[in-house]
Amino acid sequence: MSNEVAAALAVLTQGIRTELDGRRFYREAAERVADPRAQRMFLSIAEDEEEHLRILRVQYDSLSGGGGWVDLEEAKAREPTGASLQLFSQEKEAAERIIKPEMSDLDALKLGMEMEYQGYDMYTKASERGGLASQAVYRFLAGEESEHFAVLQKTHDYLAEKGSWFFWDLEKPLAEGPS
């Protein structure tokens, strides 16, 4: 196995663990909040984490099986079947919750923002290495983490200022871009 493949598998392994933690975090957050819109927001992000997991696992399977990087669109559509499922299916979700009972909603949002920033940073750094296919995957994932961070930050800021949950059209600000 080349050093480049070994390095890519290490990043993919860390990415899978990060996305597993993220998925668990957002599911816990959805269970915790009473506001139905907040629940939908957290469940939507958890679904995004599922897509990220699928992409990372497909890439891991391909690289660990001696293949190359899978095109991003193909990776989104494909189901993982190999080494990643064997490796990561044995990891049990920790019995200890990520969101502690004593945490406020603001604390939980800060934790989510920290997790998203760490993922963004990891994927951004990984995108600086490798070929075009790996760069496309990492840039896509970094962009997703950035969007999640922005949603969590806006929610945190509003909740801190107004004391209540607030929601906006999540797609509109992202699609329109800066004014």
Image (cartoon, rainbow, N blue to C red):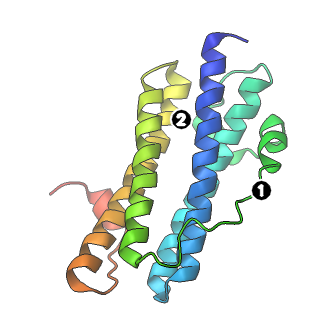
Q: Nearer the viewer, mark 2 or mark 1?
A: 1
Q: Amino acid at mark 1?
A: Lys
Q: Is residue 153 left or right of residue 179?
A: right
Considering every residue shown, the one lying at the far front of the view is 102
Where is residue 123 drawn, in percent x and y? 47, 36
In the foreground, 49 or 113 = 113
Which mark is on residue 137? Answer: 2
Chain-order first, disc 2 or disc 1:
1
Q: Does the image show residue 148?
A: yes
Where is residue 110 drawn, in percent x and y? 37, 63
Q: Secondary structure at mark 2?
A: helix
Which mark is on residue 92? Answer: 1
Q: Amino acid at mark 2?
A: Val
Quarter of the image where the C terminus is located: bottom left
Q: Secondary structure at mark 1?
A: loop
In the foreground, 140 or 4 = 4
Q: Is residue 28 left or right of residue 63?
A: left
